[in-house]
Image: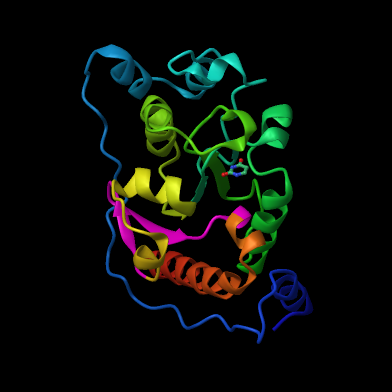
Amino acid sequence: MSLLRETLLKELGISPVWQLKESGKHGQIDTTVSETGRDSGRRGQIMRMDWNELRQAIQTCTACDLYKTRTQGVVGVGDERAEWLIIGEAPGADEDAQGEPFVGQAGKLLDAMLAAIGLKRGENVYIANVLKSRPPGNRNPAPEEVEACQPYLERQIQLIQPKLILALGRFAVQSLLNTDEAISRLRGRVHQYQGVPLIVTYHPAYLLRNLPDKAKAWEDLCLARETMASLKS
Ligand code: URA
């Protein structure tokens, strides 16, 4: 194990040191993301947008009340044709101010988690959130806010065409998998989002408060890495 990885795992609070397992076979996974038909209405319009239109639509969106309190919409960051798509919950105060996802404390941990499996923000990785606008006081997203924002994330996934999605925390997991199940029951296996393999793990902000679960997050990251390797073999 390299010194860098060892240092990063230490930073993640994981010990004893976990080894990456041999990559397993998960079969041929269909990564085709279906194109929505030419349906009319707001969702249909969003499904036909290119990146510039999408960015503009998010910045001017008034579909829920969050536009009244946000500084700016937070679209996402990274490689727009990345193989890895990381999806979090919603911008916090730092993200709202800087216009980039995961730039606060949780973001530092996310960067360390990515580095532990050889990934770097912006390099073959795209990071987005379920909500593009900050809920005031960092409260949980309301169901109508998630619903209003859903087409943006759907369109981002269609445009990016990731090979693998890593869903961080309850809101990302439940909205992408359309389930009420707890993360603890969903993690440890490969799910599918419209034909794209999806791995579930804990949100970095949760991990900062629940240190013992970092070891589980490391297992999830290993599963994600194995799954990606199996897609390429
Ligand atoms: N938490 C999230 O889910 N997303 C961010 O961008 C920042 C914190």
Part of the protein shown in magenta: 189-205
Measuring 64% from the left and 45% from the top, which residue is drawn there?
122
Q: In which quarter of the image is residue 110?
A: bottom right
- In screen coordinates, is 37 left or right of 106? left
Task: Quadrant for residue 164, please give it.
Answer: bottom left
Q: Which residue is drawn at 39% across and 24% down?
A: 148
- Image quarter where the C terminus lies is bottom left
Q: Extreme bottom residue here? A: 16
Task: Please tell me which residue lies in front, 147 or 87.
Answer: 147
Residue 185 sits above or below residue 60 on the image: below
Residue 10's spot in the image, x, y percent?
A: 74, 75
Q: Quadrant of ligand 1?
A: top right
Residue at position x 27%, y 12% in the image:
41
Residue 117, horizontal then vertical, whole percent: 60, 67
Q: In this view, does 105 lie above or below 61?
A: below
Relative to 197, does residue 37 appear above or below in the rendering? above
**How many marks on residues?**
0
Q: Who's the residue at 68% across and 49% down the image?
A: 107
Q: As rendered, which of 5 and 67 lies closer to the eye?
A: 67
Q: In this view, does 215 lie to the left or right of 151?
A: right
| Rendered location of residue 92, percent (x, y) | 65, 37
Asked whether 37 or 104 is in front, the reply is: 104
| Residue 14 on the magenta span | no
**Quadrant of the drawing holding the N terminus:** bottom right
Q: How is the image coloured?
A: rainbow
Image coordinates for residue 146, horizontal then vertical, percent: 41, 32
Q: Is residue 68 left or right of residue 130?
A: right
